[in-house]
Each structure stands twice: as structure tokens, then as C-alpha cells.
Amino acid sequence: MELATRKKTTYEKVAGTNFNGKAATHIALSMAKERGGPDAPAGSDLLIVELSSGKSQNIGNVSEYSFNKAGNLLAYTIDAAGQAGNGVYLYTVANRSTAVLDNDKASYKSLGWTEQGDGFTLLKMVKDEKYKSDKGAVIGVKTLPAHPA
């Protein structure tokens, strides 16, 4: 709701919401997805809405996402059918650009930013026929720009 005009905007089937940190210029809406089987991908649509204009951008198959503390960067993971395009991505809010940081036939999870918001970590899990459970690796991303263009 825009308080000055009392104008309301409604979104259906929203499973969760997050403002973009201290900036609070955008809101991320995680959309509810239809239930699938136990091996169904975890990703669902993520809608990024610019609050001043109402313009939105849809990112599909997002399984986890998190804004940094300043709210200028959004890290997210993709979990798609057949692991097509699975990976970790970094979205720059100011210019609406996305960078592919890592992608593979793997699952990515447990995304967490540092307290300062200048880096994050996550787990990359890969199936290996030699083992009963997935093999994991920790990915660390640091030295991110404080104020990207």
C-alpha cells in the first residue's frame, strides 16, 4: 500500500517477502509453487518489484535468495528441472544486471551473507555414484563492490 495515495497493489500466491535491506527500494516476492514429487526441483518464481515505479522482474526457479545488508545486491540460487541452469547468481539492484557466479549439474543451498554484506557462502552438492550421499563443497564469494553502478 502506498501510504500517500492509499493505492493498494495485490499479488496472488505469495509464499514469502523481503525488502532489499537498508535501501528498502525493492521488495522480493517468493511465489508459491505447485507441489511436486520428492525429486521435484525446489525452485519457484521470484518477483523483484521496484517500489517507486511498480515495475517488476521475474526470475524463475529460484530456490534460495538473500539481499546483502545494504540492499544493493541479491544473491540467489537456481534449482530447475533436470538441473538445467542450476547455479548461484548475483543480481545488482541499481542496474538490474545478473552475473553467473557458478553453475553446474548440482544443487546449491545454505546461502548466507557476512554481517557486513561484502561476501557470502553456500554449499554446492554434486551426486557421485561412488558415495551414498552427495559430495559437497563450500563456495565463498567475497570482495563484492560496495556500490555497483
Image (tube, helix red, strand yellow):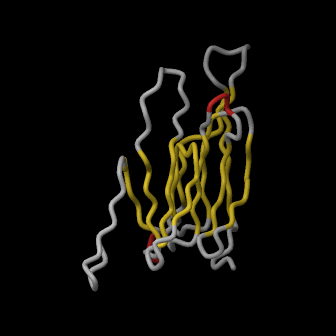
- The front one of 59 and 101 is 59
User: Which residue does the image show at 68% across and 37% down from the upper left?
Assistant: 137
Answer above or below: position of 128 versus 89: above
| Residue occupying the point 73% across, 54% down | 100
Task: Tell me: 41 left or right of 21.
Answer: right
Instruction: Look at the image and tell me in which quarter the N terminus lies.
Output: bottom left
Give the image quarter of residue 27.
bottom left
Tell me where residue 78 sits by quadrant. top right
Q: Residue at x 62, y 36 (%)?
A: 80
Residue 48 vertical placement versus 76 (above, below): below
Residue 18 lies, with reference to residue 12, above or below; the image says below
The residue positioned 70% from the left and 35% from the top of the image is 84
Out of 72 and 97, give the one closest to the viewer: 97
Q: Is residue 13 left or right of residue 42?
A: left
Position of the C terminus by quadrant: bottom right
Q: Position of residue 63 (x, y in %)?
A: 53, 43
Q: Whole-percent x and y of residue 44?
A: 51, 42
- How many numbered marks appear? 0
Question: In x, y percent, where is residue 140?
Answer: 67, 52
Q: Is residue 147 left or right of residue 30?
A: right
Q: Left of 78 or right of it: where is 38?
A: left
Note whether 128 is above or below 64 in the view shown: above
Q: In front here: 86 or 146?
A: 86
Q: Position of residue 112 (x, y in %)?
A: 53, 53
Q: What is the residue that sits farthest to the bottom in this orientation?
A: 4
Q: 72 or 135: nearer the eye?
A: 72
Instruction: Report which quarter residue 18 is drawn in.
Output: bottom left
